[in-house]
Structures are given as structure tokens and as C-alpha cells.
Image (cartoon, rainbow, N blue to C red):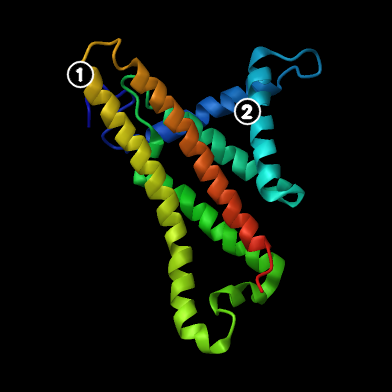
Amino acid sequence: MHPLLFFHNQFIPDHVTYTFLVMAILALLGFLATRRMDIYPNKVQNVMEVFVNAFHNLLIDTMGEHGKKFFPLIATIGFFILFSNLIGLIPGFESPTASLNTTVAMALVVFFLTHIVGVQIQGMKYFKQFLGPVWWLIPLMMPIEIISHLSRPLSLSVRLFGNIQGGHIVVAVIFVLVPLLIPLPILILKILISVIQTLVFMLLSMMYIAGAMEEHH
């Protein structure tokens, strides 16, 4: 592991350490954003409200009003991924999302929740989507549907991990090879990628959950 990484501990994996760091930052921001709300809004509250409203509008546009009960999960995922992506741009720090362990864990939460929600809303009829439109297509459709659903957490986790880890490697190499002013456009692009990957993970998660809530014919 790179010796410049802060908080490096030989007993605790770096992605775990930085996961707790991001959690602590978000908890602090949440505290600062909600204190003394009855008196006057502070700057942290104003900034956090912008993000919360953006996430809320995105959820409503994607899932509709019936998706509001999933807002705490989606917003938490959004804030965690965004801050995890961006913290890796600070020299000496590492993104928790640059580890497959972190991205797979989040993808599995979405995966299991999707099917739990599907069964809760539709009952056993939820599994009809795995059987195909007619009985004689079951041997063909069932493997295809199972593989399709199993590929979802793989797609979510590998896409996020690959983009964040690859971006950090590119930025690190450019900083070593060229003067400081030249990598600035790359840094701006990396910030944009961090935001886009956050939105992609959120959107796909909402689409999977929304799809499980719809009855399949």
C-alpha cells in the first residue's frame, strides 16, 4: 500500500478505514445541517438541502410517488458514493469505492432488497417473470432470467469500482509525469466522473427496485 496514505493500518483494510471516515464526515454534516433549524438555516444546511432536493427529485422522476419510502436508502447510497469517490482525489487519501469489497457490498444490498420488495408487493407471483410467457419456454427463459438478475450486482459493483479505481490511477500517473497545471482538466473530468458514477448507481438501483414493484404479465 502506498506509504503516503493517511490512516493506514496494517490490521484494518484501507477501504474499511476510509469507509468509516466517510461515514463520520456524513454524520458530522448531518448534525451541522440539522442543528438550530428553528432559528436560522446555516450554510451547511443550505448546501445539504440542495443535494437532498436533487436526490428527491431524481427519485420521484424515476420511481414516482410510491418510491418515496425508499428515499432514505437511495439518498444514503448517493451521499456515501459521492463522498467516497471525491475523497480519493485528495492526495494521500483513498476512495472506499475503489475497492470491490465496498461496491459489491452495496450492490448486494440493492440486489436482495429488490427481490424482497418484489415478493412483499406481488407475493409468489413475482417469480412468474422467471418462467416466461408460456410453460414450454420455461427451460429457456428461466436460465436467461436468473443470469440477467445475477448480473445486476456484478454490473453495479464492477462499473463503479472500475471507473473510480481507473480514474485514480490515471490522475496519479499524470501528476507524476507532468507539471501541476496540466492535470487540472483531468481532475475536473475525474470530479465529473465521480458525480456521474454516483448518479448511475442510484438510477440503476431505483430502476431495479421500481421494476420489482411492477406486476409482470
Three-letter amino acid code of the residue under disc 2? Phe
Answer yes or no: is residue 205 visible: yes
Residue visible at 55% across and 28% down in the picture: 26
Q: Could you say whether the residue bearing mark 2 is in a helix, strand or loop? A: helix
Q: Could you say whether the residue bearing mark 1 is in a helix, strand or loop? A: helix
Q: Position of residue 117 (x, y in %)?
A: 64, 61
- Which disc number belongs to residue 51? 2
Q: Position of residue 47 (x, y in %)?
A: 63, 20
Q: For mark 1, what is the residue? A: 176
On screen, residue 121 above or below 178: below
On screen, residue 191 above or below 99: above
> Which quadrant of the structure image shows residue 153?
bottom left
Q: Earlier in the sequence, mark 2 or mark 1?
A: 2
Residue 184 or 45: which is nearer the viewer?
184
Q: Position of residue 29 (x, y in %)?
A: 59, 23
Work out which quarter of the rendered image holds the C terminus and state it. Answer: bottom right
Work out which quarter of the rendered image holds the N terminus and state it. Answer: top left
- Badge 2 density bin: few <14, some 14–19, many ≥20, Cα 10 Å: some
Which residue is the extreme one toward the left?
177
